[in-house]
Amino acid sequence: MGLTFRRAVATALFGIVAIMALKALLAHGASAAEYLTGALAFATAVYGWFTSETVTELQMAREATIAPILIPFVKILDRWNNQGSWGVKNIGLGPALEVNVSLSYGK
């Protein structure tokens, strides 16, 4: 699930819970200050959760930008004599550590 979808669901749930809490508090004779205090505490918890989700998403995005991206390549020098060279190039921003490469030809 994407972060935007989770936020939309959380916002909808927040609205539903706030309405239910208001009805319950008003039915039991609670004052407006008690209701607002409860709503503020709940809103703080929801925004704290939003913040933690945003931090997680930013960490994953940062890790993705510095990840190594390895691209294999083959240079054919002489097609008829099966001569050529091959290699792996890192086009990512991060170092490619402990890379193992093997090449097999034929059946």
Image: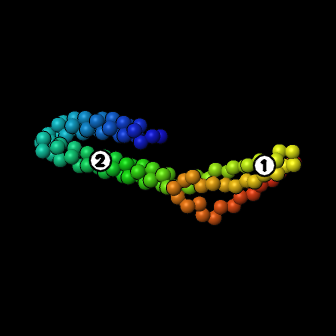
The residue positioned 70% from the left and 55% from the top of the image is 87
The residue positioned 41% from the left and 37% from the top of the image is 5
Q: Position of residue 95 (x, y in %)?
A: 55, 61
Label for residue 77?
1
**Of callouts 1 and 2, the N-terminal one:** 2
The residue positioned 39% from the left and 38% from the top of the image is 4
* Quarter of the figure with residue 23: top left
Residue nearest the viewer, comparing 18 with 73: 73
User: Which coloring applies here?
Assistant: rainbow
Q: Secondary structure at mark 1?
A: strand
Q: Amino acid at mark 2?
A: Tyr
Say if 13 sits above or below 93 in the image.
Answer: above
Is residue 15 among the parts visible in the rendering?
yes
Is residue 13 among the parts visible in the rendering?
no
* Quarter of the figure with residue 68: bottom right
The residue positioned 12% from the left and 45% from the top of the image is 33
**Residues packed near mark 2 inside 10 Å, few (<14), some (14 to 19) or many (20 plus):** some
Which residue position holds label 2? 47
Label for residue 33?
none
Say if 15 sits above or below 54 in the image.
Answer: above
Q: Position of residue 21 (x, y in %)?
A: 24, 39
Q: Secondary structure at mark 2?
A: helix
Tags 1 and 2 touching, CB below 8 Å: no
Q: Amino acid at mark 1?
A: Leu
Say if 41 sits above or below 96 in the image.
Answer: above
Residue nearest the viewer, comparing 79 with 64: 79
Q: Between marks 1 and 2, how big is the CA–CA gap? A: 61 Å
Which tag is nearer the camera, tag 1 or tag 2? 1
Q: Position of residue 80 (x, y in %)?
A: 87, 45
